Amino acid sequence: LILACIMMAVMAVTRTVAPDMVETGRTIQVSTEDRIRGAVFGALVADAMTLGSHFEYDASRIRRAYNDHLIPHYMAPGDRLDMQRDDGEWAARRYHPGTVAGDQTDNGQYNLLVLEYLAEINDSDTTFQDNAKFLMHWEDRVFRDDWKQWRCAMTNMTRRFIHMGRSKKQLGGHADVLVIRSTPFLGFSDDEDTVVEYAQKAIFTHRGRLTRLGNAFFTRVSFRLIHDDATPRAVIEQVADDMEDHWISQRVKEALTTRQEFADDAALTQKGSSTQEVLQGAIYFIVKYADDMEMAFQANTMVGGDSASRAIAIGMVLGAYHGVDAISSPWREDLNSWYQTEEWLANMPLLRGTHARIATEL
């Protein structure tokens, strides 16, 4: 009888905790490799979910378009939304021309651009420190005719600066938007500072201080979730303290207090592209839906605004926490980049038992 009671108690605890927690609640061990892949695919899946309603700021329109249900599958830009607007396929024309359901927004596509480059250089004598070759790769991909995405002002400005002969440190502009292209580096090096250094180099199109702070913040959070056993909230608080930056510490504190009081996700009204809005919105969904990764992705999509920028942060953090197996079959099978991404990831040092070569200087 005593043994039966103990077994029942253990089962009850197991049902109430997050699906892959250890001391912090994990009951299923997730390998480092699966967490790396989870961070990459989590970002891509979350991003692709937003394609259909990206930059639609009216959450009620999104809800009506999806019949008051969560997004059921990937959508092409404007799918089901055209009837809700007077200006037709504005999203498809302006931001994601040529994309179809299961494609990425520019946010996800940039992560794939970086991953492709790392996969190509991994067996050569080159490292990511050779920015000149990366810039050539970037220009070739972003400015060729089959690039399906919007090219922002900072992207076009950076290209002009390159052709003007500016140095690497003078490229980019100071727009305050949160840009994250760092998911591939999580499989490229097992040193946190190196991953952050490379993540900063990958956003050469954006030089703003807040942009770089937000980029470093989510990169560090994801890295630690891959390599440590802790909950997303605990790591978010830890990284905010360790960065010793007043702006980050205040924004994270606000996100973990004020925003947790929302009774409905639609109450998230500050949902633009600024670093503060993306950072705080992403933290809201990460913490609220920490135990249900796909629900976090869907809930983020339903709120609208710059949901894709939030999606990369939400996806990489929760993907690092839960691992790739937490992504269910429909979202895997219908993601157009899934199989190509698998091929590129297989060439990452941490996913094939080797270590990245780290250069000591630019």
Image (cartoon, helix red, strand yellow):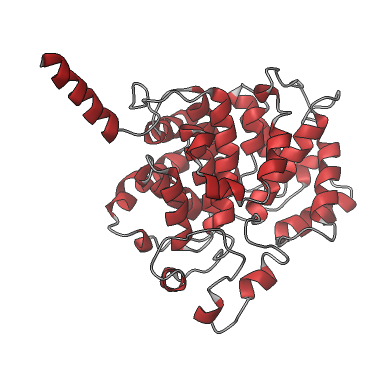
Pick the quarter of the image with the N terminus.
top left
Q: Is residue 354 visible?
A: yes
In screen coordinates, is 55 left or right of 258?
Answer: right
**Residue in the image at 67% along x and 17% along y:** 353
**Residue in the image at 46% along x and 22% along y:** 228
Tell me where residue 276 appears, x and y as whole percent. Answer: 48, 52
Q: Is residue 177 visible?
A: no
**Where 295 falls versus 4 (above or below)?**
below
Going by the picture, which residue comes out furthest to the left?
A: 1
**Where 259 falls versus 228 (above or below)?**
below
**Residue in the image at 59% along x and 33% along y:** 37
Q: How many marks?
A: 0
Going by the picture, which residue comes out furthest to the bottom?
A: 86
**Residue in the image at 41% along x and 50% along y:** 295
Tell me where residue 38 appears, x and y as whole percent. Answer: 55, 36
- The image quadrant that residue 194 belongs to is top right
Tell me where residue 124 appears, x and y as whole percent. Answer: 86, 25
Residue nearest the observer in this picture, 272 or 18: 18
Pick the quarter of the image with the C terminus.
top right
Tell me where residue 94 appears, x and y as whole percent. Answer: 68, 70
**Where 139 falls versus 128 (above or below)?**
below
Residue nearest the observer in this picture, 205 or 233: 233
- The image quadrant that residue 176 belongs to is bottom right
In screen coordinates, is 26 left or right of 39?
Answer: left
